[in-house]
Image (tube, helix red, strand yellow):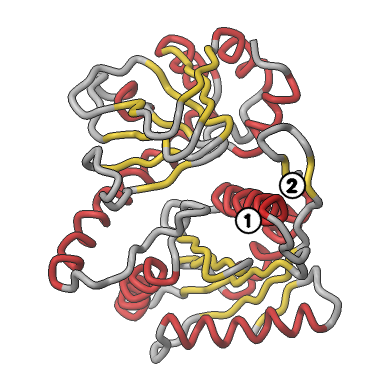
Amino acid sequence: MIESTEMIQLIQHSRLFQDVPGEVLAPMFSKAQRVALKQGTILLAPGKVNENVYVIISGRMSVQISPSSSDKPLAIIAQGDCVGEMSVLVDGVVSAYVIAVSDCEVYAIDYASFWSMIEGSNEAARNMLNILVYRIRLGNESIADSFLHRDNPTESDIIDRLTGLFNYHGLRRKFDRLLHRRDARKQPLCLIVLKVDSTEPIDSDEDKYRIDQMLRTIAQTILTFLRPDDNSARLIGSRFAVLLSDISLSAAIETAERLRSAINNVDVVMPDGSGVQNAIVSAGVGEAYSGDTCGTLIARVDQAVEQAISEGGDSVKAV
């Protein structure tokens, strides 16, 4: 059975379990089996029958079309993320490879326990719906991106390997599509840029590992705030971006405030259970104009971030 502290940590990092009552989760977790996976292990493969939902405790896994290590992943998933839910919910047959890209530990939740949670909690059903919408959208956009790669094979990978978020190239593609939709439908489009106010100097591999864990924690916290049409990216270093569709600037500022507070208060926990100093971030917010490119919008909002940091940090500025 999962220890209560570990269950709480998973809930904090998981979009699936967010706001689900503990009395609904406890019976499911009491039956969960802990499984260790070595780097390179194929957890799920297309055509195979799957009867479990797997929740990642530590490590990272790749979702991809082929088992080749050179294949571009559809997604990189980490602590708190789940895999296998699509096959469990539909017909039991797996549609993509899920491969451990590092040593991992997962909890295997059986079919009956998983469905009991969904049926016993409106929050769980809502979370599952949001995840399914995101997965379907990601699959559709991967098909579209494959045509772009065919026409431009030198285009950089669109996924940040550390966090599983988009990188700048991925965000730029999303921005171009959403800006076109903004102009056609007259819907506002806003951007939040977040930056860690300060980080420790990297003097050793251990320092780098701690900062990497902090950045992964920030990424997972951002994901809990996303609506189905929102997108997030790690730009460079400790800078992150959140692209918000159909939202006013004032509402985007409120979202940035909540996100800043959530990141500042979430515990950064290493795989061995030890703690790391929490990240303190500042944010800039801006609305896209018709003549904007992704680069000009980021540059404009980035100035607001730097102003927030120069004035003491831990705050939000709008442009």
Above or below residue 32? Residue 104 is below
The answer to the question of whether label 2 and label 1 lie on touching residues, with beta carbons closer than 8 A, is no
Amino acid under label 2? Val
Above or below residue 182? Residue 213 is above
Res 183 quadrant in image: bottom left
Secondary structure of residue under mark 1: helix
Res 231 quadrant in image: bottom left
Which of the two residues, 147 or 202, is positioned nearer the viewer here? 202
Q: Residue at x 23, y 32 (%)?
A: 95
Amino acid under label 1? Leu
Residue 169: % across, % down: 38, 71
Residue designated by label 1 = 215
> How far, Cα to Cα, is label 2 from label 1?
12 Å
In the visual, does 260 lie left or right of 118?
A: right
Above or below residue 167? Residue 204 is above
In the visual, does 4 lie left or right of 35?
A: right
The disc placed on residue 129 is none
Residue 165: % across, % down: 47, 56
Residue designated by label 2 = 266
